[in-house]
Image (tube, grey):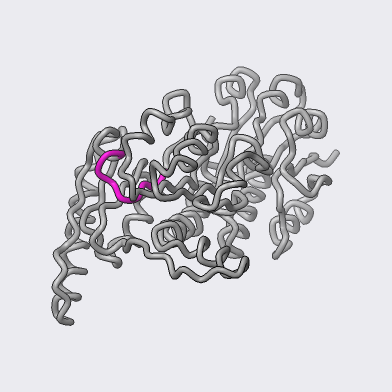
């Protein structure tokens, strides 16, 4: 009997059928999310409880893992594992795999584009034109600014590499791990970029990169971009108290996970103009329909950090290959 695979993530194989072909050509019976949207936890549990494998997005899988008696593998499309109850999976003998590298280029580029957008008020200007206004709003540049990066893993490091070309004054790194070695490497790269620009007659100074604590990050950064997992320690990390200590001109970017930024508190901070603006790609409940939709000084995107054609196709293909290799007895890098 062929193994049955349920695909809960949305979208799946929108631009390229290779992931689906990989599964079907190896004899798997595949059922794809029929709802055309992100599935809710209980919907995943009801739909996938009798399957052998699940290809998942960011859906909370706790209800599914609790009820299933057949599931042998969860293959995450993406990097985060906060939606997967790993301890419960170990207890029930369910293996877990993910695709941590494929997503990094797309998310890092979106994060930088949102920093530029928020600092230069690009989306705000677009809204003005559409309602007949023309104020030519002033903004800030990355060049000469202090940019804070919360979380210096795969994506955080890529963001830093992109930012160096803009010649920020400083990049502040906040991470639980000691990042001294990586910071030294980035400092050498910053020095080389400075030399190239200096030879072209540019008078900027080389970017300084240093590791700091969270309090320094929020107090000194002109822009903060979040690239840390959602955990009990990071839940509501950006709340009324912490965001009130940010600079009045600061922007806050979240392309990581919903729940790290308290959305109600962010609404109050932005509504009171305590910080300049924010950009949110992720939310506690998706699709998002909350109060932030009523504000002008926030950019809202549709959890689309991974949604470049190439990265999405790579993530889906790797997730499908993890399923095929697991059941065919080939080597798979498992989280548990």
| One can see residue 77 in this view | yes
Q: Position of residue 102 (x, y in %)?
A: 52, 54
Say above or below: 89 vs 292.
above
Give the quadrant of the C terminus: top right
Q: Residue furthest top?
A: 91
Q: Nearer the viewer, residue 25 or 129?
A: 129
Say above or below: 233 vs 38.
above
Q: What are the residue bounds of the magenta stretch?
A: 218-226
Please state the total of marks drawn on the protein image.
0
Q: Position of residue 315 (x, y in %)?
A: 59, 53
Quadrant location of residue 167?
bottom left
Say above or below: 335 vs 18.
above
Q: Nearer the viewer, residue 303 or 121?
A: 121
Q: In the shown orientation, is residue 127 left or right of residue 207?
A: right
Q: Nearer the viewer, residue 55 or 321?
A: 55
Q: Position of residue 147 (x, y in %)?
A: 30, 52
Q: Residue furthest right?
A: 1
Looking at the image, which residue is at 32% across and 63% down? Answer: 141
Q: In the shown orientation, is residue 304 left or right of residue 175?
A: right
Q: Nearer the viewer, residue 95 or 62?
A: 62
Looking at the image, which residue is at 61% across and 46% down? Answer: 294
| One can see residue 31 in this view | no
Give the quadrant of the N terminus: top right
221 drawn magenta:
yes
Looking at the image, which residue is at 24% across and 37% down? Answer: 216
Q: In the shown orientation, is residue 36 left or right of residue 285?
A: right
Q: Position of residue 218 (x, y in %)?
A: 31, 39
75 drawn magenta:
no
Q: In the shown orientation, is residue 202 left or right of residue 69?
A: left
């Amino acid at each position: 009997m062929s193994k049955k695979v349920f695909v809960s993530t949305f979208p799946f194989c929108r631009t390229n059928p290779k992931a689906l072909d990989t599964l079907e050509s190896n004899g798997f019976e595949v059922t794809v999310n029929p709802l055309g949207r992100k599935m809710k936890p209980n919907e995943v549990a009801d739909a996938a409880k009798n399957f052998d494998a699940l290809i998942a997005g960011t859906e909370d899988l706790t209800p599914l893992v609790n009820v299933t008696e057949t599931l042998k593998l969860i293959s995450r499309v993406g990097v985060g594992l906060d939606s997967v109850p790993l301890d419960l999976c170990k207890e029930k003998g369910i293996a877990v795999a993910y695709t941590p590298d494929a997503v990094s280029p797309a998310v890092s580029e979106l994060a930088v584009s949102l920093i530029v957008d928020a600092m230069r008020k690009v989306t705000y200007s677009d809204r003005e034109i559409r309602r007949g206004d023309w104020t030519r709003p002033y903004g800030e540049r990355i060049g000469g600014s202090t940019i804070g990066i919360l979380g210096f893993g795969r994506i955080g490091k890529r963001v830093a590499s992109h930012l160096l070309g803009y010649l920020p004054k400083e990049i502040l790194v906040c991470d639980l791990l000691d990042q001294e070695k990586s910071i030294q490497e980035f400092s050498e790269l910053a020095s080389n970029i400075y030399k190239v620009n200096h030879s072209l007659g540019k008078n900027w100074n080389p970017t300084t990169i240093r590791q700091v604590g969270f309090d320094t990050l929020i107090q000194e950064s002109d822009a903060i971009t979040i690239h840390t997992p959602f955990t009990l320690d990071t839940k509501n990390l950006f709340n009324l108290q912490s965001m009130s200590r940010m600079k009045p001109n600061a922007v806050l970017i979240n392309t990581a996970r919903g729940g790290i930024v308290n959305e109600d508190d962010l609404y109050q901070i932005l509504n009171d103009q305590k910080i300049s603006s924010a950009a949110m790609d992720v939310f506690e409940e998706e699709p998002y329909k909350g109060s932030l939709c009523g504000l002008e000084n926030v950019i809202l995107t549709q959890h689309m950090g991974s949604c470049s054609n190439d990265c999405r196709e790579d993530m889906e293909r790797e997730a499908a290959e993890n399923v095929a290799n697991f059941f065919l007895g080939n080597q798979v890098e498992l989280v548990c």
